[in-house]
Amino acid sequence: MTHSSSQYEQPDPAALPPFQTLLECTNWASLATACGTGEALPAALTLLTDADPIIRESALHDALGPVTHQNSIYEATVPVALYVAAILNHPSITAGEDNPDAETQNRPTLVQLLDWLGDTAYDANDECVAIDERLYGEGIHDEQMRAFRDARPAIYSAVHSLLGHDNADVRHTALVAAIPLIEHPLLTQHQADLAAHARRLLATSTDRHHRDRVLDALRAWGQDPSALENASDIAAREHYVRLRAARASWEGGYSEDPPF
């Protein structure tokens, strides 16, 4: 999805501005979102650092939903992503990340922010670009996707610091978020480091989503993770193969008249 030119510029791709600067120096009202402009985003983004976890939980939907609706990237997505990266070490977010809050019964804010950064990075990864090129020809045709991809080094600078976090959910979610970010040419040097983190995750985690992401990454990096797979991984991999085959058959049409 392409919109008019952004009113936010990131001059140094590896520099992550302070969150206050991003909040105050971005012309939010001029940036497109899924439901209009980003005029309401500053208030929602500010609440992400509120001391009350219930308020933060409500703000997550208001701040992040409008800029990643239906896996699309909008003009406001990049400054929001940079802001989210810049507040990952904010005291209100890092306090109490060891356990979900008893009042909200949700995953800690820190983990949810990392999840969102990772999901958005996957929406702009090399595979998505390849799909775009198959449809529209060579080159990145989505201006906002290009802007997010350019911002990956700045976002990674914040995510990287959490790869060794004491909380397993935090460090594993940070790893999954980091995987699509290091596709940037300035970050490919971190592949070996992330591979080591991936192997440690596979030795301890039972999270299906996390395991799928790191196994796919290891294969993409030319490594054979078969020795690290468990029975659940093998079953999931075989299930995905069957789903892809069924989809390919469906997309290819019927070889004979359907039975109705």
Image: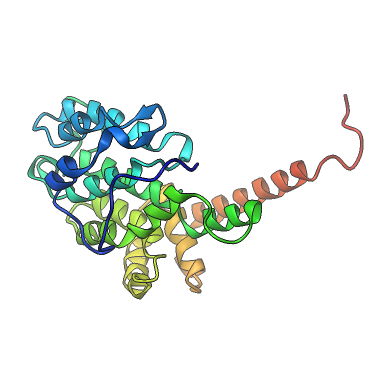
Residue occupying image coordinates x 37% and y 69%: 195
Give 146 or 54, whichever is nearer the viewer: 146
Give 140 or 249, whichever is nearer the viewer: 140
Looking at this rendering, what residue extends furthest in the right direction? 256
Against 139, is 101 above or below? above
Residue 60 horizontal side relative to residue 246, left or right: left
Give 91 or 74, whichever is nearer the viewer: 74
Splitting the image into 4 quarters, where does residue 197 fall? Answer: bottom left
- Labels in figure, total: 0
Residue 37 horizontal side relative to residue 124, left or right: left
Residue 240 visible in the picture: yes
Splitting the image into 4 quarters, where does residue 14 fall? Answer: bottom left
Splitting the image into 4 quarters, where does residue 174 fall? Answer: bottom left
- In the rendered view, how is the structure colored? rainbow
Residue occupying image coordinates x 72% and y 44%: 246
Residue occupying image coordinates x 51% and y 74%: 222
Quadrant in which the C terminus appears:
top right
Residue 229 visible in the picture: no
Residue occupying image coordinates x 39% and y 71%: 185
Residue 178 drawn at (x, y percent): 33, 59
Residue 112 drawn at (x, y percent): 28, 40
Give 204 or 177, whichever is nearer the viewer: 177
Against 253, is 172 above or below? below
Residue 74 drawn at (x, y percent): 40, 40
